[in-house]
Image (spheres, rainbow, N blue to C red):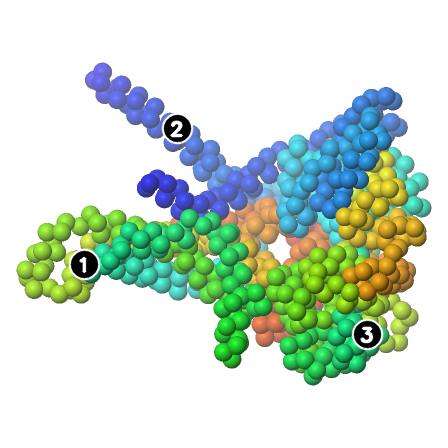
């Protein structure tokens, strides 16, 4: 009895730092954002200059957010982005990991570091670097294609989303690869020997041994990528001044940022943030449910 | 290592959470504000009392002007804190501090188009209580009016941007083109340039910079915003603005102008290489050109802004800024005195000009100032003679609304769509009208379409 009580106390003690930080920096801000999203400002006097008061507004900020076509467009845009970006990212990360893990691979530590290196560059810096490679007149790539008779506009309305996808892939494929590599390393090599004895070729080893066993790592990186994609912010913000196709509500995060810090409408920004958070939750947990059910079927 | 990776990955997720947190912090104590406006007679400071005021600004050269004030006024020290330019986060910083009720400066840089927005949130001190009306005569009238609402004075004007046409004189001469007097000439010149050099354009139409387009509409005689009794009026979609939008629709459709963003690397490169050979811009554009295309020195000239036919000579204004006293300032009288000194004292103006702050709002500041000189970059031309004429030919009745920056965004969005082949600039103007009315309504204000 005595030990269990001290155990409980010890457990509480160990948990405290986490719970306090979690409450202060996660639960509280989210709660405040939800509260803020339910408020609006009423004004009095001629031209509204006679003072203001904050009133409860129900869900009017949410209806306003959904009625704003620029905001709904931004959601559709990141969904389209995710539909392409997530499979491309996960496919590339898995491919790189399998290549590094292949029996014939040479100079593995070098390539592993090289693939991972872009992850060490902060997103803003990466966007500035790539921005230079996209801007006509400055970019050697665009100039080279131009002299070959190919006039490409990497920052135009049809292409800039994929120019951003390229930056994001460059930044994070190496990181996701490393997660998959870690899982590949943990596979017991006896399994490969057994497969070889059964007559499996290299491709069959990948298909029937490696891929099923790294499934948890792929699921994890997919969830990371879904969340990261919906939160797209720094890349479009940095590229905005050099592109003619990125507006101030290009992504949901950018829209909320603009409402809060340019239009001074914190309530609408809060509503937009909450909508985005819910969407990220639904998609992430939806994906986990989906793969979980498939896992049970197997 | 694993924790480190998770931390790094968490960075992206945290961006969203950080926003929420910022919202939370900014929201604390909303509506409370600082209490205790000081006594109107003294403005707070007792004779002989030593005080310190803080001043947030991003204007180049202002640090030297403030240092000069401090050396002359040991009792009223001003502490300058440099902040990012207003639209790059400066205003967000001010509004957050004001909303939090602490940490806001006594004085701040506020551009003309932002004054109504600050006013709406109750963030500016009425300086007429501290004798500001006696200072009206020291400033160009229309700029003084930018800070006047009803009987109150909310801002001391600092600088503006009368407009002209910057062009590459060497290339114009080579191609046999005169600087365009009218917008029809401008179009013809654009055609000639396209014919003479397939790489060159007369200018760019910056789809993401509707402040520039606004200045062109201002020149054409549009008057977008105003007040009528207790109602704000919005008239973006008027005949004059549509005329300007239609004109640029035609220029873009016929590929007579580039559509790249201004103030960006690609544009600077084009200026350096003679791929963009003209720029309709404000007086402060001189330092943008000389700073970003230094090797073209001596080749540029300035002509008056191209004109619409059948109207007396009219120029326009792009940009303009004031010094305002923010809510909670402890010594508003002293703050006002500093603001007036900063923007009228010849020595202070000289330092600000040196930094490149624009066109002085103080009356008759040109004669004898450092602006009144030949510029080597412009082949020895006294370019400010052109801008002095322009300054006299600006429609003085232009005013702004509390949601100006949102209106700019709506125009930008529409222009960007038009460039992408969805719609026209005229359609963008129509859409911006409806959206701007909605913005004002959403702020809880009465609004009416038309002037």
How far from the left and from the top, in percent, is residue B267? Answer: 64, 65
Residue occupied by mark 1: A103
**Mark pair 3, 2: CA separation:** 71 Å
Q: Total label count? A: 3
First in sequence: mark 1 or mark 2? 2
Do marks 3 and 1 share a subunit? no
Q: Residues within 10 Å of mark 1 (few under 14, many from 20)?
A: few
Do marks 1 and 2 share a subunit? yes
Provide the secondary structure element on which disc 2 rests.
helix
Image position of A100 (left or right of B130): left
Pair 3/2: label in front: 3
Q: Residue at x 23, y 59 (%)?
A: A105
User: What is the residue that sits farthest to the left in this orientation?
Assistant: A197
Q: Residues within 10 Å of mark 2 (few under 14, many from 20)?
A: few
**Mark pair 3, 1: CA separation:** 71 Å
Q: Chain of mark 3?
A: B
Image position of B183 (left or right of A109): right
Q: Can you say whether B81 is above or below B160 in the image? A: above
Give the image quarter of residue A238: bottom right
Q: Residues within 10 Å of mark 3 (few under 14, many from 20)?
A: many
The residue nearer to you, when weighing A66 against B252, is B252
Q: Can you say whether B134 is above or below B199 in the image? A: above
Q: Residue at x 60, y 51 (%)?
A: A259
Give the image quarter of residue A242: bottom right
Residue occupied by mark 3: B179
Q: Look at the image and tell me in which quarter the N terminus of chain A lies.
A: top left
Residue occupied by mark 2: A17
Q: Residue at x 19, y 54 (%)?
A: A213
**Mark pair 1, 2: CA separation:** 45 Å
The residue nearer to you, when weighing A193 against B294, is B294
């Amino acid at each position: 009895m005595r030990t269990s009580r001290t155990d409980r106390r010890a457990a509480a003690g160990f948990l405290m730092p986490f719970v306090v930080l979690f409450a202060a920096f996660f639960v509280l801000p989210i709660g405040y954002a939800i509260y803020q999203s339910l408020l609006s400002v009423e004004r009095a006097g001629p031209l509204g200059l006679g003072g203001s008061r904050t009133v409860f507004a129900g869900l009017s900020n949410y209806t306003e957010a959904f009625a704003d076509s620029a905001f709904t467009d931004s959601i559709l845009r990141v969904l389209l982005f995710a539909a392409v970006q997530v499979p491309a990212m996960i496919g590339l990360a898995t491919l790189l990991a399998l290549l590094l893990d292949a029996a014939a691979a040479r100079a593995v530590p070098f390539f592993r570091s090289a693939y991972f290196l872009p992850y060490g560059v902060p997103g803003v810096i990466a966007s500035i670097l790539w921005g230079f490679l996209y801007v006509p007149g400055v970019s050697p790539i665009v100039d080279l294609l131009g002299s070959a008779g190919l006039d490409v506009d990497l920052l135009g309305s049809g292409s800039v989303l994929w120019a951003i996808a390229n930056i994001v892939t460059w930044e994070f494929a190496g990181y996701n690869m490393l997660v998959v590599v870690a899982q590949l390393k943990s596979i017991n090599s006896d399994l490969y020997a057994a497969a070889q004895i059964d007559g499996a070729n290299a491709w069959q080893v990948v298909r029937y041994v490696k891929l099923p066993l790294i499934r948890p790592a792929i699921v994890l990186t997919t969830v990371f990528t879904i969340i990261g994609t919906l939160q797209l912010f720094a890349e479009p913000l940095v590229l905005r001044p050099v592109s003619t196709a990125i507006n101030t509500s290009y992504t949901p995060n950018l829209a909320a940022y603009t409402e809060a810090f340019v239009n001074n409408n914190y309530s609408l920004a809060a509503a937009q943030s909450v909508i985005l958070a819910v969407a990220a939750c639904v998609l992430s947990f939806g994906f986990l449910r989906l793969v979980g059910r498939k896992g049970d079927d197997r | 290592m694993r924790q480190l990776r998770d931390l790094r990955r968490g960075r992206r997720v945290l961006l969203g959470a950080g926003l929420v947190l910022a919202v939370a912090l900014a929201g604390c104590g909303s509506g409370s504000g600082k209490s205790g406006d000081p006594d109107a007679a003294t403005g707070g400071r007792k004779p002989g009392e030593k005080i310190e005021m803080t001043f947030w600004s991003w204007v180049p050269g202002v640090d030297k002007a403030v240092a000069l004030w401090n050396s002359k006024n040991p009792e009223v020290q001003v502490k300058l804190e440099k902040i990012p330019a207003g639209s790059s986060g400066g205003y967000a910083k001010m509004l957050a501090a004001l909303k939090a009720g602490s940490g806001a400066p006594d004085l701040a840089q506020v551009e003309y188009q932002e004054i109504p927005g600050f006013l709406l949130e109750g963030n500016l001190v009425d300086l007429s209580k501290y004798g500001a009306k006696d200072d009206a005569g020291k400033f160009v009238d229309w700029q003084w009016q930018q800070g006047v609402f009803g009987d109150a004075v909310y801002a001391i004007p600092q600088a503006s941007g009368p407009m002209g046409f910057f062009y590459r004189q060497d290339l114009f001469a080579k191609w046999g083109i005169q600087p365009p007097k009218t917008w029809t000439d401008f179009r013809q010149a654009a055609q000639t340039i396209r014919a003479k050099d397939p790489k060159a354009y007369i200018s760019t139409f910056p789809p993401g910079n509707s402040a520039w387009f606004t200045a062109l509409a201002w020149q054409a005689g549009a008057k977008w915003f105003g007040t009528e009794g207790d109602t704000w009026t919005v008239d973006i979609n008027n005949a004059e603005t549509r005329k300007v939008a239609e004109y640029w629709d035609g220029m873009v459709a016929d590929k007579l102008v580039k559509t790249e963003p201004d103030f960006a690397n690609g544009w600077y490169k084009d200026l350096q290489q003679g791929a963009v050979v003209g720029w309709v811009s404000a007086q402060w554009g001189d330092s943008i050109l000389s700073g970003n295309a230094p090797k073209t020195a001596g080749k540029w000239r300035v002509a008056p802004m191209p004109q619409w036919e059948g109207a007396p000579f009219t120029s326009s204004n792009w940009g303009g800024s004031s010094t305002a006293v923010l809510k909670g300032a402890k010594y508003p009288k002293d703050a006002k005195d500093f603001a007036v000194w900063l923007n009228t004292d010849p020595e202070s103006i000289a330092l600000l000009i040196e930094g490149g702050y624009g066109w002085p709002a103080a009356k008759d500041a040109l004669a004898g100032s450092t602006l009144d000189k030949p510029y080597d970059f412009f082949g020895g031309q006294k370019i400010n003679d052109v801008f002095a004429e322009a300054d006299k030919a600006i429609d003085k009745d232009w005013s702004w609304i509390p949601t100006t920056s949102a209106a700019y965004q709506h125009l930008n969005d529409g222009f960007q769509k038009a460039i992408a082949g969805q719609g026209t600039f005229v359609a963008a103007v129509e859409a911006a009208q409806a959206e701007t009315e909605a913005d004002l309504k959403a702020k809880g204000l009465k609004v009416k379409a038309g002037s």
